[in-house]
Amino acid sequence: MNIVITGSLGNIGKPLTAELVQKGHTVTVISSKAERQKDIEALGAKASIGSMKDADFLIKTFTGADIVYLMEAWEGIGSIFDKDIDFTAGFHQIGNNYKKAVTASGVKNIVHLSSVGAHSATGY
């Protein structure tokens, strides 16, 4: 299967990518940081470098995928410790971009995971 993973090589993305590649799937990992390309490729996956805030980038990357794993990633918005960032607006934009990209690319299967609260011991 052709699988696209958002969220780069974090605590979920890295082991998930390694397992999927080991099982013979073609995996593309989206990252906003070009310096992660070598690490992604070292796992046997393809790197797609761009922003979750760029719907056209997402459409292009999702096109042809059998499954897209969508993660609400903080890094696409900014530091969780920056009190001047409007995370609600950021998550809204990324969510709308995901919807637009899934619809426009024709992806039939998605898995969505929100990391909201993952930084907190209480979960919110």
Image (cartoon, rainbow, N blue to C red):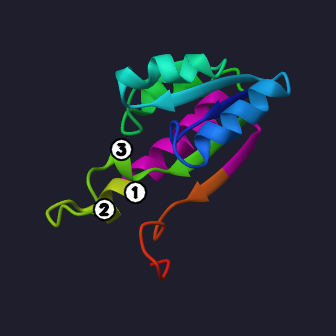
Separation of marks 1 and 3 at Cα, in angstroms:
9 Å
The residues colored magenta run 93-111
Tell me where residue 118 appears, x and y as whole percent: 48, 66
Tell which circle, 1 or 3, labels the residue nearer the N-terminal end.
Answer: 3
Kindly identify which residue carries mark 2.
Answer: 87
Q: Amino acid at mark 2?
A: Phe
Q: Are marks 1 and 2 in contact (CB under 8 Å)?
A: yes
Residue 79, horizontal then vertical, whole percent: 26, 54
Q: Nearer the viewer, residue 104 or 66?
A: 66
> In the picture provided, is 29 more to the left or to the right than 23?
left
Mark 2, secondary structure of its residue:
helix
Q: In which quarter of the view is residue 17 placed?
A: top right
Q: Are marks 1 and 3 in contact (CB under 8 Å)?
A: no
Q: Pointer 3: what residue? A: 76
Task: Kindly state the secondary structure of the residue where label 1 is placed.
Answer: helix
Tag 1: amino acid: Phe
Residue hosting label 1: 91
Residue drawn at 50 percent across, 77 percent down: 123
Q: Could you say which quadrant of the image residue 82 lies in?
A: bottom left
Residue 60 appears in the picture as rendered: no
**Pointers 2 and 3 in contact (C-beta within 8 Å):** no
